[in-house]
Amino acid sequence: MHDLAASTPTLTAQIGAFHGRILLGAWCLFWVLMIVISVQEHVVDGGNRWWEPFVWEGSSAVSASTLAWLMLRYLAGPSAGAPGQWLRRLLPWLPLLCVIFFATNFSLRYGIYALANAHYSHEPWSHMFLYESLKFFLFFGLWTGIVFGLHSFTQWREQNERLQRLQKALAEAQLAQLKAQLRPHFLFNALNTISSVMQVDVARADRLLTRLADLLRISLTAGERDTVPLQEELRLLQLYASIMEERFTDRVSVRWRIPEEMLGVPIPTLLLQPLLENAFKHGVEPSTAPQVIDICAHRDDTTLHVMIRNTCAKNPDFGREGVGLRNCRERLHVLYGDAATLSLTGGHGEVTATVSLPVSGVHA
């Protein structure tokens, strides 16, 4: 959260500076076009003092730019969520700003004409005030809309960035919680297995403890990452399978059918271990006859499919899910959204757990 708070002002400043440059460039281009149009009209009307159009439009540009800066500096505080409030803050200032614009304009023009020893003639004051007022309101409406749009977009970007960071932080917290739930559950079941063997064969129990230590070391290292290559996940599964095969000697055979080209595909850490654990718990443990567990994978254009299939002595009950399966589903949803699935199918003395997830990467 500290990183989020520290990064937001930087992002806001960067976006604000960028939009400020855009606004300044558009403002300058606008007044250049106004001057060009005024010069053309002056030439068409037969004017012989080339500098007059620059004085007329230049004085308006200086007055309008000064008022715009003051408006942005002291009055504007646009909010994407409350445009009416922002406009209500500005509207009461319009009459005063209009008078200031008119007075500043003509003060500059009369002053420049006096320096040039020239007479500044114009339409009656009532006509000029109406004309300049309309021009001022045009400027105000146009540029206030642009400024409001840019500020609103900046604020939207800031809020969107903050929301994405908060969602990412929430997802990371959820994953950390799910992995924290998984480790005690897995460790309890593994120690329970070793305890049952220790009663009949101390040497085998010692071998199992050694393998469990290796398994825990690998799982702790892998647990620091959200995903690992499939090859690393399979290494952890092989250690777990070796522990279980020691327990169920001559009662289970584990077959691995993973194409070599899929070993580098990323997969969530410790995702498959609960599925293999269920295969031993529900397929091998209740049965006295030899059972088979197949671990295989295949890939289409965008999806990796990993299947753990086991034979079983009785029809499975899919009505209830334990901690392991529920944990796997939640982690897949956090990482991939709806793009990943975990399904259980059964029939003809077999149960298959299938994990399907996109090869491209985690859900943004």
Image (tube, grey):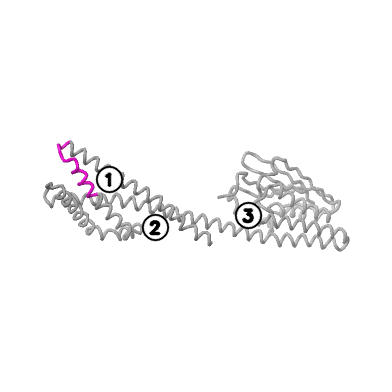
Answer left or right for 62 relative to 173: left
Q: Are marks 1 and 3 in contact (CB under 8 Å)?
A: no
Circle 2 is placed at which residue position?
Answer: 81
Q: Position of residue 71 (x, y in %)?
A: 30, 57
Q: Position of residue 169 (x, y in %)?
A: 56, 58
Circle 3 is placed at which residue position?
Answer: 331
Q: Residues within 10 Å of mark 2 (few under 14, many from 20)?
A: few
Circle 1 is placed at which residue position?
Answer: 31
Query: Is any atom of residue 197 visible in this view?
Result: yes
Q: Are marks 1 and 2 in contact (CB under 8 Å)?
A: no
Give the foreground label among 1 and 2.
Answer: 1
Q: Position of residue 210 (x, y in %)?
A: 81, 58
Give the foreground label among 1 and 3.
Answer: 1
Q: Place residue 167 in its image quadrant.
A: bottom right
Q: Place residue 203 in its image quadrant.
A: bottom right
Q: Residues within 10 Å of mark 1 (few under 14, many from 20)?
A: some
| Distance Cα–Cα, label 2 vs label 3 | 35 Å
Is 38 above or below relative to 81?
above
* Boundaries of the magenta span: 44-60
Answer left or right for 349 relative to 131: right
Closest to the observer: 208 or 294?
208
In what element is the residue under mark 2? Answer: loop
Answer left or right for 363 relative to 148: right
Mark sitting earlier along the chain (1/2): 1
Closest to the observer: 89 or 178?
89
| Distance Cα–Cα, label 1 vs label 3 | 58 Å
Mark sitting earlier along the chain (1/3): 1
The residue type indicated by label 3 comes to Arg
Residue 54 in magenta stretch: yes
Q: Position of residue 253 (x, y in %)?
A: 82, 48
Mark sitting earlier along the chain (2/3): 2
The residue type indicated by label 1 comes to Trp
